[in-house]
Image: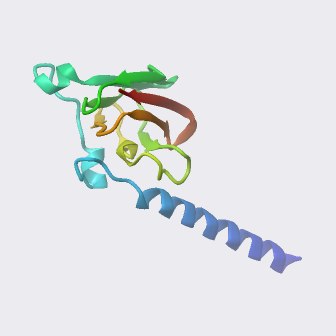
Amino acid sequence: MKNLKTVSLIAVAIASVLALTACNAYKTTSSGESSSEREAVSTSSAGDATNEEAAVVTFSDNGFAPSTLNVKVGQKVVFENASSSTLEVNSAPHPTHTLYQELNIGKVAGGASGSTSFAKAGTYKYHNHLNAGQNGTIVVK
């Protein structure tokens, strides 16, 4: 009985490591930033012309707002983290994040932001990997 418990614990540990590794393996951005570069992205200044044209999704303790955002092909989408905790923006489906690579922005510290854009029209779903119940949709036309 003791061996069965030990084997079960080892199996759960291995499965957890594999799942986390799979999540990290698919984190990319359209700009080719590394994970550490994505974590260090800060909010652009208000005078930046591209920031004025960007669509903004704000993350707070209540989740993403707006929950559905409509943008044009090529328009910049900025994810602003207005919470005090780290946010991890990843594409659906959870936990593989393979369907919409543009949305695998990664970690965004509280008070910072990360961004992406879309080359094709479509409906793109994303979530906070640290709390998969917090999710949203971007409709690109």
The residue shown at (25%, 29%) is: 75
Q: Residue 140: which quarter of the image? A: top left
Residue placed furthest toward the right: 1
Q: Is residue 76 left or right of residue 61?
A: left
Q: In the image, is residue 102 above or below residue 98?
A: above
Q: How is the image coloured?
A: rainbow
- Quadrant placement of the N terminus: bottom right
**View extreme (bottom): residue:** 3
Dividing the picture into quadrants, the one containing residue 44 is top left
At x 43% / y 42%, what residue is drawn? Answer: 88
Quadrant showing the C terminus: top left
Residue positioned 24% across, 33% down in the render: 74
Image coords of residue 7 (percent x, y)? 75, 76
Q: Position of residue 32 (x, y in %)?
A: 24, 53
Of 110 and 70, nearer the camera is 70
Residue 27 image position (x, y, % from top left): 38, 54
Q: Would residue 16 appear left or right of 53 to someone viewing this image? A: right
The image shows residue 89, relative to residue 83, as above or below, that is: below
Against 134, residue 99 (above or below) is below
